[in-house]
Image (cartoon, helix red, strand yellow):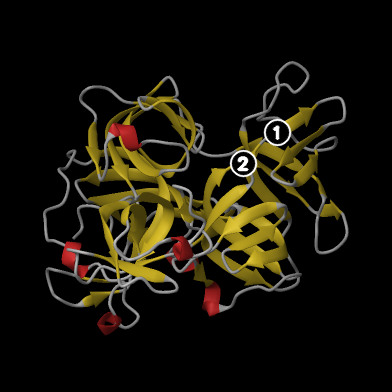
Amino acid sequence: MKTSLFGPILFGTLLALASCGGGTSGTGGSGVTSTGTITAFGSVFVNGVEFSTSGATIVRDGNPATESNLRVGMVVTVNGSRSGSSGSATRIEVDDAVKGFVEAKVDPNHWTVMGQTVLVDDRTRFENNAQPGVGEFAEVHGLVVADGTISGGFIEKKNAPFPAFEVKGFVKKHSDASKTFDIGALTVNYSNATINDMPNPATTSWNGLLVEAKGSTCTGTAPVCGTLTASKVEPNGPQMQEADEFEIEGFVTSLTSTSDFVVGNQRVVTTGSTRFEGGVAADIVIGVKLEVEGVLSGGILTASKVEFRESVRLEGDVANLGAGSFGLNGLPGIVVTANGLTEFQGGISGLSGLANGNHVRVRGRLGQLSSRLGDADWLDCRTGEPVRDWPESGEL
């Protein structure tokens, strides 16, 4: 029997796979625009680069901020320069995903906020470790995975007075006649909204565009918003057309071919000289998380490097099968665990459909390591000391 398991399966003890190595080659301090998740501080780490924040303009919610206002798990766009794995930021802008009331918690891994499914797992960070409950206001930071789905990176419970409602996602069911569209399960009414940066809705359908809608009025039965009366609708994500060095982290949201696809809202093409790390071109499918680097021209990112993020592939025979985890023969110390986000394929619906000895293929990501690390997530193989945040590729 050969069974496949794909999805965000978590890996418990993975020290056996860690190895030391050098960083990426530099670009001589060239200008760069980098969009991705903050993974660590001591400066700000984004997409494997440590950006110095000295003198940088930092913006959160449209207001001036400082590095102390930033958190691991927030998605930011960094403008500045870089040389290898070091850089200097001139501007850092925070891009949150949704603000509104928690409408439901289907299970610990699936929340509903403003009609959007928020995926929550052991890597999601919470301000002061406080999780908002159903009916409480939450500010969610993370990347859009697909229509109406956000991967939660950082979540903050907000107390009154609440900020304005906000949601980002892909437009569907756009009707200029009724001045409405949907994002996930939320309806947005833009009849009185500022839409200056959007295409003319009378002549151009907005369907498929990644947008951000803001407003202070919801119509629905609390805590469900139902319909957001927008005060502003604008395009979301990088709107640049030209850049000699451009980096973006995100999920593949559309796929024409494995050499022509969309990450977030950014079209990416690959060539024969594109370098792949952590996978091969054939592994590019909708829902895979990537980091792409290259040259942006005419709004199209021609990739020099495509890195598969949070993606580890293993294959072997199941051993030590338990209620929520299993090992693999020949890979001592590796523990594969599943949760509510795990997708099962091959005719099974969960770990209960497996047996010791079954041959499986597993795709997942690195989770917390062995218990001897305590609260740390990985061991710095240069010092042997525990470090709290998993490094980007090239930092081990």
Q: Secondary structure beneath disc 1?
A: strand
Q: Secondary structure beneath disc 2?
A: loop
| Label 2 or label 1, whichever comes before in sequence order | 2
Dot 1: within a 10 Å radius of its alpha carbon, few (fewer than 14), some, or many (20 or more) residues? some
Query: Where's residue 259, x and y in %?
Result: 35, 25
| Residue depicted at x 14% and y 69% | 381
Closer to the camera, 205 or 195? Answer: 205
- Tell whether 383 sits left or right of 367: left
Query: Where's residue 208, x and y in %?
Result: 62, 30
Q: Which mark is drawn over residue 147?
A: 2
Amino acid on which disc 1 is placed: Lys
Closer to the camera, 56 or 165? Answer: 165
Q: Quadrant of residue 199?
A: top right
Closer to the camera, 356 or 251? Answer: 356
Q: Quadrant of the C terminus?
A: bottom left
Q: Does 132 appear above or below 244? A: below
